[in-house]
């Protein structure tokens, strides 16, 4: 295990200006182009359109997903629709078209929307958290890293908040760190390689719309193709003749037959999650299922009403993106307009100070651009997170799961759904069987998954709760 | 009182950043955005407790209003669902409107209440809605007075 070198951040050092060279910008330096925050984003994401579009770095099999959908639908419209319009009704391509549009748009939205990424802590924040942890014990001589959990009571349930060493924050409830994207994501559901992005608070509704509309689309195409072949086979011609007359239908039939079961299953599973206000992550880990035999454990976030749960998950207010991709990096050393004083900006316009001053004051005085958190610890820290992996029974599946796997020394798996479009017609089993969980001890001792890493710190670390 | 500033301009001209105080989130009601109203000890000598608590409570109310699940949010959600969420590209959601109200409120509070006391509040949205960051400024003339406070922060938290 990598030896993690955790350094205490000295708050005093933060209060003074960061000593990055050159300390004071010289006027004759050519002013650097103001950079947008997405350019210095520490997570593993890619941005397009000047920060408007965000994707995970490993886009997974998104092109395959898109390709399969477009191909199958295209074949349907070209080869099956004319026959069906002629023999049945003209509504068929209309319905198919509407479903297809729904599927594509919701897929793109799922893939390109910020799932609810939490920006990393500024150095001052991280130092403040450490201070809070150190002080109660009163020991300042021997340094040790902050304890990894904090407990809060939510709706009479005790919930443990874990400390994220990469982002240097105590994660809010239901937030999890995705190692593939190297970000903490709010209301983390899972990282879906099929859409090439995490599914979290902000894009769960898009994902749900995607899988539901895709179920309808595949079922619809399957039904229509079957009808088409049945009609062609009539009159004593036989199925073989029908297939020869329309070979594309055979391909569509195969794809749809294998997809419809898995996608219907997935939709059903997510409908259950929506109705009970759970995330895949919580369901897999069994966070609220009372595995310890304690019947009082229940989901503290549920409204105990199916309708209210559905409405809050799917129709609730759309939270904003917290990472402000298109904002500009506050200039600390790089000159944008004029030389900046150590403590406060030399504002050009006194009259504007009141309106813009607060933000400018803070940004230049605080000197904490987003990039400061991209510390070398980021990569090693990512291995701390061991999200359980769903391993459906068929063998080839694990190949897909490793697609995004980091090559680290710990068997680090990401949590992923697998739509078995290819060849396997298995239902998605999200029932956590013992072998599916890579973090073998179950969640109540949630630190057990980090034991491997904590060995380095055990001598110093004695406040594990 | 350690230092008095009459407005942001004076703050700007003669103050230096001494410390930052962070008000953490309060998760007792779940994942809704709410901040702790506990008064931090570092601000003891800088601002009255009631003023501070009022500010935080008002902010909490704004956030509750933004995240409220009720008639309007359902309407917005259903309409969005029907249009495959494309309306999010066109219209400003209620949440965004409330966020603008919040930043106006914070600016007003900074100008009227906090800057005269040598403090500045950062909008939580700039810190990922994790904390309310309050920057404590000291007069440059008396720079040594509270710069040590960061390392010797007392029990309070």
Image (cartoon, coloured by chain):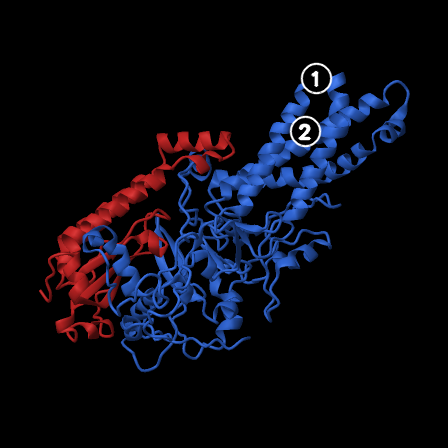
**Residue carrying label 1:** A89
> Seen in the image, is B93 located left or right of residue A2?
left
Asked if residue B67 can be seen in this view, the reply is no
Quadrant of residue A78 within the rendered picture = top right
Q: Position of residue A71 (x, y in %)?
A: 71, 38
Quadrant of residue B147 within the rendered picture = bottom left
Given residues B31 and A90, the one toward you in this image is: A90
| A362 vs A96: above or below | below
Q: Position of residue A409 (x, y in %)?
A: 60, 71
- Residue at 88 percent of width and 18 percent of height: A235
> Seen in the image, is B116 located left or right of residue A440?
left
- Residue at 12 percent of width and 64 percent of height: B45
Q: Label 2 to label 1, Cα distance in Å? A: 14 Å
- Residue at 45 percent of width and 30 percent of height: B78
- Residue at 35 percent of width and 33 percent of height: B70
Q: Which mark is residue A142?
A: none
Q: Tell me, by letter, which chain the rendering colours blue.
A: A
- Chain B on-screen colour: red
Outermost residue to the bottom: A141
Q: Which mark is residue A220?
A: 2
Disc 2 is attached to a residue of which chain? A
Describe the element under mark 2 as helix, strand or loop: helix
Disc 1 is attached to a residue of which chain? A
Q: Quadrant of the C terminus of chain A?
A: bottom left
Asked if residue B20 can be seen in this view, the reply is yes
Q: How many marks?
A: 2
């Amino acid at each position: 295990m990598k030896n993690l070198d955790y350094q205490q951040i000295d708050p005093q050092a933060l209060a003074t200006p960061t000593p990055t060279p050159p300390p004071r910008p010289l006027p004759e330096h050519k002013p650097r182009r103001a950079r947008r925050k997405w350019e210095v984003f520490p997570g593993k994401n890619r941005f397009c359109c000047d920060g408007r579009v965000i994707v995970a770095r490993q886009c997974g099999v998104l092109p395959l997903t898109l390709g399969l959908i477009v191909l199958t639908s295209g074949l349907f419209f070209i080869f099956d629709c004319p026959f069906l319009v002629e023999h049945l009704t003209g509504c068929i391509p209309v319905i198919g078209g509407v479903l297809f549009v729904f599927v594509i748009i919701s897929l793109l939205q799922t893939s390109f929307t910020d799932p609810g990424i939490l920006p990393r802590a500024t150095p001052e924040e991280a130092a403040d958290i450490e201070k809070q942890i150190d002080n109660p014990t009163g020991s300042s001589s021997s340094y040790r890293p902050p304890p990894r959990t904090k407990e809060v009571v939510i709706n009479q349930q005790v919930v443990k908040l874990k400390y994220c060493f990469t982002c240097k924050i105590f994660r809010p409830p239901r937030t999890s760190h995705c190692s593939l994207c190297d970000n903490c994501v709010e209301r983390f559901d899972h990282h879906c390689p099929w859409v090439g992005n995490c599914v979290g608070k902000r894009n769960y509704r898009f994902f749900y719309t995607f899988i539901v509309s895709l179920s309808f689309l595949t079922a619809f195409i399957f039904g229509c193709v079957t009808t088409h072949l049945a009609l062609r086979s009539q009159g004593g011609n036989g199925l073989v003749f029908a297939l020869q007359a329309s070979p594309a239908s055979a391909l569509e039939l195969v794809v749809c037959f294998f997809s419809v079961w898995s996608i219907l299953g997935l939709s059903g599973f997510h409908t259950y999650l929506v109705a009970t206000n759970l995330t895949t992550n919580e369901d897999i880990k069994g966070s609220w299922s009372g595995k310890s035999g304690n019947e009082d454990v229940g989901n503290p976030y549920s409204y105990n009403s199916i309708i209210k749960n559905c409405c809050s998950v799917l129709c609730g207010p759309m939270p904003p993106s917290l990472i402000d991709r298109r904002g500009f990096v506050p200039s600390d050393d790089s000159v944008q307009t004029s030389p900046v004083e150590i403590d406060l900006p030399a504002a050009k316009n006194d009259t504007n100070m009141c309106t813009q001053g607060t933000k400018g004051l803070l940004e230049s005085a605080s000197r904490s651009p987003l990039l400061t958190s991209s510390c070398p610890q980021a990569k090693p820290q990512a291995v701390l997170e061991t999200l359980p992996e769903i391993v459906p029974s068929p063998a080839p599946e694990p190949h897909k799961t490793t697609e995004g796997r980091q090559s680290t020394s710990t068997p680090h798996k990401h949590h992923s759904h697998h739509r078995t479009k290819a060849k396997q017609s298995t239902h998605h089993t999200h029932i956590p069987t013992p072998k599916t969980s890579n973090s073998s001890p179950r969640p109540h001792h949630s630190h057990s998954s980090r034991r491997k890493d904590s060995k380095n710190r055990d001598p110093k670390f004695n406040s594990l709760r | 009182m350690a230092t008095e500033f009459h407005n942001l301009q004076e703050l700007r001209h003669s103050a230096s950043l001494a410390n930052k105080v962070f008000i953490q989130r309060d998760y007792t009601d779940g994942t809704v955005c709410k901040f702790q109203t506990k008064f931090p000890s570092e601000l003891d000598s800088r601002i009255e407790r009631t003023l501070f608590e009022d500010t935080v409570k008002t902010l909490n109310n704004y956030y509750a209003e933004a995240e409220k699940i009720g008639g309007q949010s359902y309407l917005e959600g259903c309409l969005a669902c029907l249009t495959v969420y494309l309306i999010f590209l066109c219209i400003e959601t209620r949440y965004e409107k409330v966020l603008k109200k919040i930043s106006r409120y914070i600016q007003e509070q900074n100008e009227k209440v906090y800057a005269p006391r040598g403090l500045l509040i950062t909008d939580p949205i700039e810190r990922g809605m994790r904390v309310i960051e309050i920057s404590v400024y000291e007069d440059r003339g008396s720079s040594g007075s509270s710069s040590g406070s960061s390392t010797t922060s007392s029990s309070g938290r």
